[in-house]
Structure formats: C-alpha cells, structure tokens
Amino acid sequence: MGGDNAPDVTVEGATAFLSARKDAFVRLHGDEAKLKPILAKYSSVADRMEIVHTEDIITGDMKPSQALRRGRNSSMWNALEDVKEGRANAAVSAGNTGALMAISMLVLRKMDGVHRPAMTAAWPTLRGRSVVLDVGANLEADAAQLVTFAIMGEAYARAILGIKRPTIGLLNIGSEEMKGHDEIREAHEWLRGSDLELDYQGFVEGDDISSGKVDVIVTDGFTGNVALKAGEGVARMLGVRVREALTGNLFSKLGAVLAMGGLKNLRAQMDPSNVNGGVLLGLGGVSVKSHGGTDGRGFARACQLAADLATSHYRDEVATNLAKIRQKGIAAE
Amino acid sequence: MGGDNAPDVTVEGATAFLSARKDAFVRLHGDEAKLKPILAKYSSVADRMEIVHTEDIITGDMKPSQALRRGRNSSMWNALEDVKEGRANAAVSAGNTGALMAISMLVLRKMDGVHRPAMTAAWPTLRGRSVVLDVGANLEADAAQLVTFAIMGEAYARAILGIKRPTIGLLNIGSEEMKGHDEIREAHEWLRGSDLELDYQGFVEGDDISSGKVDVIVTDGFTGNVALKAGEGVARMLGVRVREALTGNLFSKLGAVLAMGGLKNLRAQMDPSNVNGGVLLGLGGVSVKSHGGTDGRGFARACQLAADLATSHYRDEVATNLAKIRQKGIAAE
C-alpha cells in the first residue's frame, strides 16, 4: 500500500474496483493494524478482500538498487510474489516507480524474446486515447527493442482500449533528409516489411500524438518521458490560464458559472485519474503503476486496467509475434 | 518571400514592422511584378522598403540538398547574401525550413567555436516565455554541443527576452539512478563546474518547460523537436475541447459569450504569432525562420525578433564564452 495518500486512497480505490467488478478478489499488502480500521468502512465488499500483513515498506525516496537489496518482504515485493506464484493475476502499486520497475523485473522476469520491458502511458487524444511507450523504463532503444515495443503496445492497446486492430506509429521528427536516428530508420524498415499482422502506419511527429493519428506511439524511454511530461506541463499551464481568463472580471465570472456544465465535462475527460495506470510491458506477469498522487477513483481505474490486461489475450499475442521475429533474428533469445 | 501566404502576408508583416520600428529598413527579395502592386498599399513606409528582384524561388517541397544545388539567386539565398555582405543586419524567411538552415549555414558560415548551429523556439510558460534549443537543427548533440547550446541560448534569451541573467536548465528525465545519457551527464558536470558566468540550475524535466522554471532549456534537436510538437499538439487538442465544452448547451453557450473577453485575452497570449520566429543560432549572421502559415502580425513579430537580435550584444557575448571553453578544450576549433 504505497502512494502519497496511502493507505486510505488505495483501500478506497480497491473497494470501488471490487464494487464495479463482481468477479474480482483483492489481496491488500500492508500493515494490518492500519488497514483493518479503514477496511471496516467497506463491509459490502469485505468478503472479497484479504489483508496480507507486513510492516516493511519501500519508501518513496529509496533508489531502485536499495529497494532490491532491502525490499524483500515489503508490501510491494509481496504483491509481486503473489503474481509470480499465481496467487494473484496482477499487482497494482501507487508507490515508488523505480523500485516497482526493478522489483517487477527481478520477481516476474522478462518474457522470452523481450530485451527490456517498456513503460506505457495512456495519452488523451482528439479521438479517445492512445498508448505511448516507452515513457521511461529505458534510456535508449535499438531497432529490435523498438520493434518489440510495437508488438507489445499493439497487443496492449487491443486489450485495454478495445480496438480490434490498433494502428502503430514510430515517433520521429519531420525533416525530410534526416529522418531520425539509425535505430529508428532500421525499426521503420523492419516494421514496414514484416509479415507480422501489425497495422504499422509509418513515422509520426510529436503533434500527431494528441491528434490521435495512431493508437500506439512507439519511441525510446527518454524521448517518450520528455514528450509525456512536456504535454502534461502544457495542459497544466493552459488549465491555469483558462481559469484566470474565466475569472478575470464580473462578466467572465458569470459566464464561467453558466459554462460550468461543459467545463466540468471537460475536466472529467481530461482528469488524470481517468487515464491512471502505467504498465510495465514485457514481464512474466502484470504489474501496474498508479500515479502516487491519485485519488480513490484513479486507483480504482488502475485496478480495472490491471484486471482488463490480466484477463485479455495480451500475453499470448505478444508471445506469438515475438516468436515470429525471433525466427528472423531480430529479437533477443 | 516564402511561406504559405506569400507574398501578401510577408509584405503586410514587413510594413507593420517598419511602422513600429522607425529606424528600420527592409529589402524585399522576390518578384518585382508581384510585389509592386502589394507595396502600393503601404505608401507610409514605402521610403524604407526596397525590392530586390528575382524570379527564382525555393519551393516548399525542395530538399535541403536540392536547395543548395539549385537555390543560388533565389530570394532566400539573396537575402542571406545581403547579411553576409553587410547590406542587411538580419534575414527573415517564412519559407522552407530545411532549405533555410542549409543555405544559412553555407552562406553565413558557423561562428568560431560552434560545432553545429541550433534552432530555437520561444515556449509560452506560466511566467512568460522560455527559450528551448535545439528544436531540430541536429538529430544528436554531444556534451560539447550541449554546452555550446547553453552559451548561445543564454545570450539569446538576454537579447530577446530582456532578462539580465537568464537561468539555464538541461532537459533530462527524472529517474534517480539513470540520470540521462552520458552526454547529458557530462554536459551537466561541465556546466556546473564551469567558470563561465552562466546561471546554470541543473536538470529540468519535460513539465518544467511550461512552468517557466528556467529561462533557457537545453536539449538535443530530436528531443527538443518532439517536446515542442507534443506540446503544440496538446495545446491544439485542449483548444478544441474547451471550445466544445463551451458550446455544448445553451447555458454554456451563453456563458461562453459572457466569458469571451477573458478568453480572447488568453487566445492573444497563446497566439502562435506572438511567439513567432525560430532563430538558427551559431551562425556568422542573423537568420530567422517564421512559421510558414503565420499571419502579418506574426511575420512582423519575426522581423522584430531579428532586429532585436541583430542590435544586441548577443554575438560578442557568445564569442567571449566560446573562447573561454575553447581554452578548456571542450569547444570546436
């Protein structure tokens, strides 16, 4: 039970998830003495929750290497062991991102054929949502890794966005004569010529992400992380500016009150808790990262995403495609 | 005279610039037969404008290499020759970006100590404007190039933003134990330890750009281009969403009308034409790129920026700092 507002928000989110999903069961990893009084408030779903007691925690300031050394028997580690041992279908955490990635990789291991796992983000677009990956699990990605990200992102988009045949784009910059780094060009050639059944649409640019031009945007972790945060920064700035503009004088204040219904809908659409949940793809089990500062609804959304992914055909589809590219010598053994 | 709406918008912008800046003179490069009838509309500044006739143009779809081969005597090339020969203090174009970069580099040459020029963008923030570079002149940047970008960006921010001592940040991703690529870490160490009088604030992340945490954001051209376009994409999407929200029903429509004053101010603040003008820094002369699709006001803004830069101490300041780092063996000879 990690995150900025744990364990209250986490328990609230988990119970909201259980109310929406009647076939689910939640194992809450954390300090029984703290969890029990909170759980008492949610009696309607109490029979589908179980506390797995531990007092050890991964703190927010722990480095991944420290978490690996000292984290055994922490709530985060135990949740991932649950997945590994088949006691759970997925793990969800709002705690330390770096630690979750490191422990997930150690405990769940990588899928065969995956060089490096990739972190996803759900990006709100003019047409709905797109999946961007990698947004920070790796600094760099060679051509084979980018192709693997495309395969994983495509299956993931089908699982969680419900799109039958997600389209894929490779993030690049536009200039005619220098079409990106060698690794991007190589991945492009490979995806274009592959006999995988992927709907690869070619290069996309930064502004194509929000337009929803493709369902899956593939890039390295450094670029993806910068793009995601740059976009979040612009959204936050514009939010502040719109609020200022609408409360600048009496007329605009009155206008804002009248327009409130529409603006509330917009806020709901753009609410980060509606798109909460980054998934580390390419592991031997489902590990979902919730924003640390999320609310109960956001954490419930992350649980829902974990459940959708765990009950989908995602892993089989990825495994099939990875086996195909391995034959061609591009994927890792 | 290039750009999507040339020559009308370009002439309109140039004359607006002349009206605002009484000491300026403009040499219009282009087809006299087309320019003369348009110029006739602007008699009040006609004595400070001169047509330099040519019928040759660089088209929007020409590759940089084609432009270099076939562009001699085009309006773009002639404008840059004007700068080289001292007939003008700066060149401004709304035409083909790649061609402008290539011809600028060939005609104006690089400043001593500059490995590669860098393209700037002015990014609207919560505190005003920040300068981001490189946004696409290069695909990659090693540590020495990033340090050079910092030096050029700082002097540029002082020249055009009027900030006495601009702060500088190096764009990175946040994860604790993998603080960016080797070249970023190396540039960081160098900027931190340097005896240049730069106000270097360390690493910044993508969302710090819009918050205005620092005045100058330094990054490689690939990352900068993706960040800029991702930000533009988010702004465009939110613009559409706010409009939809405000016209969703009768109440919100009425509200939008009442709130219009504030929203108009916001639109003016965020108007791309208010931040129009990317500059290719590191050349032996001033070359400014206006957005191709800008309006007259935007093109006037680009001219203003060119004039500000040309009349500033920018080049002396950069030359002094580059000489210092060259002694340390980091800059190009």
Image (cartoon, coloured by chain):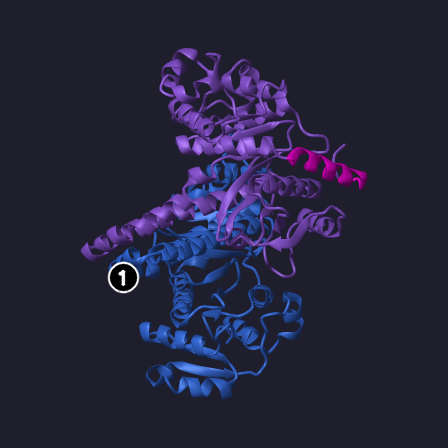
Chain colours: A blue, B purple
**For the point 46% across and 16% down, which residue is it?**
B30
Residue B112 % position (x, y): 72, 30
Q: Nearer the viewer, residue A170 or A196?
A: A170
- In the displayed structure, B309 sits above or below B180; it is above
- In the displayed structure, A239 sits above or below B131; it is below
- Name the chief secondary structure element in magenta: helix
Per the image, is A87 magenta?
no
- In the displayed structure, B321 sits above or below A111; it is above
**For the point 53% across and 28% down, which residue is it?**
B98
- In the displayed structure, B226 sits above or below A233; it is above
Judged from this view, the residue extending furthest toward the left is B250
Residue type beneath disc 1: Val
- Can you identify the residue that label 1 sits on? A257
Residue A145 % position (x, y): 56, 48
Per the image, is B327 magenta?
yes
**Residue A304 falls left or right of residue B184:** left
Range covered by the magenta-colored residues: B313-330
Q: Is residue B294 visible?
A: no
Q: Nearer the viewer, residue A42 or B62?
A: B62
